[in-house]
Amino acid sequence: VVAVARRPWPFTVRVQGTLVEDESAMVGAKVSGRVKEVLVDLGTPVEQGQVVARLDTEEFDILVRQAEAQVAQARATLGLKGNTPDDQLDPRRAAPVLQEMALLEEARLNLNRARRLTDKSVFTQEEVQTRESTHQVAEARYASSLNAVQERIALLALRRAELALAVQNQEDAVLKAP
């Protein structure tokens, strides 16, 4: 038997076992990369949306700049300047189409002139056929120029999607608490 006495309790208690947290969360990145900095320690309480780590964004930044340059290039091939919205482009008003339309109109006028003057023996039948062929070529070139502009518009849409993906990857390089 021991007599009861007051004694100081030790601050360190040695025990064996496992600690179980009340709450936990798994944090992962949507993109792969090297961890640049970790902003919280293991077991530190965090708020929802709090930044817990950042990946090195140098490559993501370069990909965003590359995608922006490709969008600018696609806009330039369509003749879009400054802040002109992409959807305000009328393919029939694009420079290559206007050029081919002018050539088509010239070929049409030459053909009509030749047909009118054939009766007066100013043009031979061979010259009229040559002008008909020139008119058909001009029609085909006009249609081709319209298709080319539609293709460039589709390429611009693709470049916009690539830019959006690059920006999203850049944003995903910041890991936040769920």
Image (cartoon, helix red, strand yellow):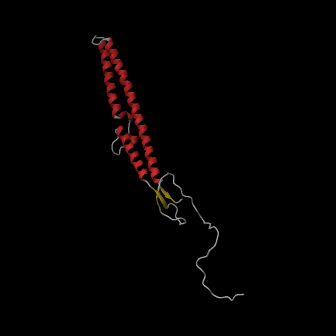
Q: Looking at this view, is 130 or 58 the one in front?
A: 58
Relative to 29, is 112 above or below? above
Q: Looking at this view, is 83 or 49 the one in front?
A: 49
- What residue is rendered at 34% in x and 32% in y? 96
Q: Looking at this view, is 24 or 41 the one in front?
A: 41
- What residue is rendered at 33% in x and 45% in y? 82
Location of residue 97 in the rendering, given as x and y in whole percent from the top left corner: 35, 31
Relative to 65, is 7 above or below? below
Location of residue 124 in the rendering, given as x and y in whole percent from the top left corner: 30, 11
Q: Looking at this view, is 105 or 103 the one in front?
A: 103
Quadrant holding the C terminus: bottom right
Task: Evaluate whether residue 147 shows in this view.
Answer: yes
Location of residue 79 in the rendering, given as x and y in whole percent from the top left corner: 34, 38
Which residue is at the far right?
1
Location of residue 24 in the rendering, given as x and y in whole percent from the top left corner: 58, 62
Which residue is at the far left?
122
33 left or right of 70 in image: right
Residue 15 lies in quadrant: bottom right
Q: How many marks?
A: 0
- What residue is rendered at 37% in x and 33% in y? 92
17 left or right of 63 in image: right
Residue 1 lies in quadrant: bottom right
Relative to 156, is 13 above or below? below
Task: Evaluate whether residue 78 shows in this view.
Answer: no
